[in-house]
Amino acid sequence: MLANQVRLAPPPRRVGLSLRILNGVGHPALWAVFGFTTIFFWTFVANADLSFITFRGPFRLVAAKVIAVEETGASESDTPVMATRYEYSVGGEWFRGVSYSLREGGVVGQNVVVQYLESDPASSRIDGMRRRMFGPAVMVITLFPAVAGFFLAWSIRKGRRRRHLLEHGLVAMGKLTDKRATRVRVNRQTVWELTFEFTGRDGRKHETRARTHQTMRLEDERQEPVLYDPADPSIAFVLDEMPSRPKVDLAGELEGRPLAAALSLILPALVIVGNLAALMNRIGD
């Protein structure tokens, strides 16, 4: 975007739906990380045995018969997790259950002792075994989607600020004053932090920083257009850093990007639908 081409209409400007989506949906890389980490959440954490919280007495004991012993395909410390299925009778009514262990689960036809809740005979486990596949230690995995979710929420919040500036911000020309490498890499390329200095409507100097691994578009001009909040110039963005990279028509109004907006929704939709499906499957389990 050339500096002499930036002629935005006076605020408030109309920000179309596509630009609102592009600036408010969050960074796609963070959606990808969040979606990836939630796979481990549903695989491990959702199958963690929290019996010390969820399975509390008073209990009754009953004899049960093992009807199947299966390998789950999961393991802990290279020890296979086995699933033992069983059936038992309480008050003339038959129930079935499954318990998990890190050792052989027994032999089909073998009698075992089962604990069941006095208030809910269908809730049970073989004495000494788990009700779920993994031990409670796997709950630590919750940290990964939690951290990813935090940064995703931060990205969405930052996008809302960009959207606000598109509607109400003023334009100033920013001069590159500093450039430093960060420890972050994207596609094997270093992410750089570039500092731009601009003069606000108040006549004072202010700074804004942009992070990108594609620095060319922020260094192709002697000065880069910066959009800032006149009420708080510390809130500012370099226009060419914005994911929407908005174009401006001859009247100074912002042009929409419907195709880019539609594509930007694909990954979030997949992540949300995938997690809702996993949740519904967990509820129905």
Image: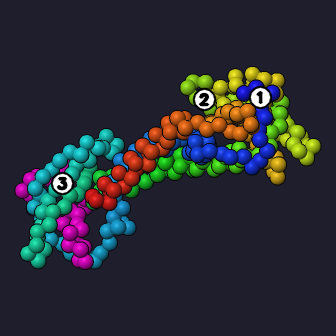
Residue 122 colored magenta? yes
Q: Secondary structure at mark 1?
A: helix
Q: Disc 3 designates what residue? A: 84
Whole-percent x and y of residue 193?
Answer: 72, 32
The mark closer to the camera, 2 or 1, is 1
- Ranked by sequence position, the earlier of labels 1 and 3 is 1
The mark closer to the camera, 1 or 3, is 1
Q: Disc 1 designates what residue? A: 5
What's drawn in magenta, residue-wise? 104-129
In-front residue for pair 179/117: 179
Taking the view exactly as shown, the residue that stands out farthest to the right is 203
The mark closer to the camera, 2 or 3, is 2
Q: Disc 2 designates what residue? A: 185
Instruction: Check disc 2 and give the amino acid type.
Output: Arg
Mark linked to residue 52? none
Q: Secondary structure at mark 2?
A: strand
Whole-percent x and y of residue 148?
Answer: 53, 46
Whole-percent x and y of residue 93?
Answer: 10, 72
Left or right: residue 285 compared with residue 113:
right
Other residues around mark 2 within 10 Å, as few (<14) / some (14–19) / many (≥20): few
